[in-house]
Image (spheres, rainbow, N blue to C red):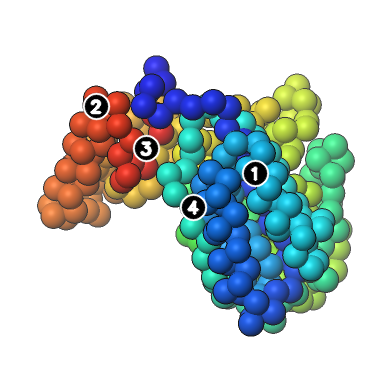
């Protein structure tokens, strides 16, 4: 049952990014302006601003979201901002943070220019035919825990702990796969498209010529492709309080362990090692007594606030 303390009218979620240059001297101005507009419009979430572009996910009333997107699109080079929408009845974020970063998605390869070097975009409607071709090598550029809960049939899983690990994986295991399979093309995908902008640019810089990626990422595929025709299996992890989504971007069954912030399904929550707000199978042996006590107190305060009908500022769990 939805907790009435956190229920709200329909809230629009916008996941967005754009690789376009922002002068270093303009970063603070852009950050402050976006923070002010978001605050004024009741929009919450996170936006990352860097010299290479802008990335983030925000949520709020539809008019507020449109006002923020209008502000971003008014920036030079951002008229073609990539945005994916969803709706929710519960606020997925508690705060609004606009941060200046070195990269809008961290790969640690400073010489890449995804705005000009990215691979060939493939529309969701054309993706099935591409990845079903046995001469295509399909690579999931997401992290290990994301691939565990959902992936495309036949995709190679690098099982990286973070996107920063992808270049090392490719230069060793990925390169070996190309040498072994000799595919005619490489097809890559990620959640919303941004990691593929960088990873395809990286492969091209490494000398791989025929590189493609799913336009709009898994989220657009799940939104536009009929489930009966889908080659996607499982749920797609998302970096907000929905945790995972399925076809039609309907919220999935996963929740987060608040000890390690990894997704859990029903089986994980049924484990005797799972303690709400404290730990799960994955992290039960990696937290000391002091951490467990701190997490337990946080959970106690959240539950107290919920019983009082209050929104707890430290609350990070879905209702």
Nearest-to-viewer mark from 1 and 3 = 1
Between 288 and 19, the residue placed more toward the observer is 19
First-in-chain label (4 vs 2)? 4
> Tag 3: Cα neighbours inside 10 Å, few (<14), some, or many (≥20)?
some
First-in-chain label (1 vs 4)? 1
* SS at badge 4: strand
Residue 96's disc is 4
Disc 3 target residue: 317
Q: Are marks 1 and 4 in contact (CB under 8 Å)?
A: no
First-in-chain label (1 vs 3)? 1
Q: What residue do we see at 44% from left, 49% from top? A: 95
Instruction: Say above or below: 6 vs 297.
Output: above
Q: What residue do we see at 77% from left, 25% from top? A: 226
> Tag 4: Cα neighbours inside 10 Å, few (<14), some, or many (≥20)?
some
Q: Are marks 4 and 3 in contact (CB under 8 Å)?
A: no
Nearest-to-viewer mark from 2 and 3 = 2
Q: Are marks 1 and 2 in contact (CB under 8 Å)?
A: no
Q: Give the alpha-carbon distance from disc 4 to disc 3, as whole Å.
A: 17 Å
First-in-chain label (4 vs 3)? 4
Disc 1 target residue: 65
Q: Give the alpha-carbon distance from disc 2 to disc 3, as whole Å.
A: 17 Å
Q: Give the alpha-carbon distance from disc 1 to disc 3, as whole Å.
A: 23 Å
Horizontal arrangement in the rendering, residue 249 relative to residue 272 (left or right): right
Q: Is residue 2 visible?
A: yes
Q: Position of residue 48 (x, y in %)?
A: 57, 63
* SS at badge 1: helix
């Amino acid at each position: 049952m939805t907790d009435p303390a956190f229920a709200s009218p329909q809230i629009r979620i916008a996941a967005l990014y754009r690789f376009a240059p922002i002068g270093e001297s303009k970063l603070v101005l852009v950050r402050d302006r976006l923070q002010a507009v978001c605050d004024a419009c009741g929009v919450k979430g996170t936006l990352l601003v860097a010299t290479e572009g802008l990335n983030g996910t925000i949520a709020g009333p539809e008019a507020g979201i449109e006002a923020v997107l209008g502000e971003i699109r008014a920036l030079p080079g951002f008229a073609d901002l990539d945005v994916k929408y969803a709706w929710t009845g519960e606020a997925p974020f508690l705060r609004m943070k606009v941060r200046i970063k070195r990269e809008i998605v961290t790969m640690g390869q400073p010489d890449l220019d995804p705005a000009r070097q990215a691979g060939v975009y493939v529309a969701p409607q054309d993706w099935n035919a591409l990845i079903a071709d046995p001469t295509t090598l399909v690579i999931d550029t997401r992290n290990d825990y994301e691939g565990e809960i959902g992936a495309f049939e036949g995709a190679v899983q690098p099982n990286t702990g973070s996107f920063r690990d992808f270049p090392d994986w490719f230069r060793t295991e990925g390169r070996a796969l190309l040498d072994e399979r000799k595919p005619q093309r490489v097809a890559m995908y990620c959640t919303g498209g941004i990691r593929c902008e960088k990873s395809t640019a990286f492969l091209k810089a490494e000398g791989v010529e025929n590189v493609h990626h799913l336009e709009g990422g898994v989220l657009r595929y799940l939104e536009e492709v009929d489930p009966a025709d889908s080659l996607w299996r499982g749920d797609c992890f998302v970096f907000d309080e929905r945790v995972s989504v399925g076809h039609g971007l309907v919220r999935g069954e996963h929740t987060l362990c608040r000890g390690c912030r990894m997704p859990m399904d029903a089986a994980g929550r049924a484990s005797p090692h799972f303690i709400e707000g404290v730990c799960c199978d994955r992290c039960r042996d990696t937290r000391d007594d002091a951490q467990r006590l701190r997490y337990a107190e946080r959970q106690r305060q959240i539950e107290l606030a919920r019983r009082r009908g209050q929104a707890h500022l430290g609350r990070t769990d879905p209702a």
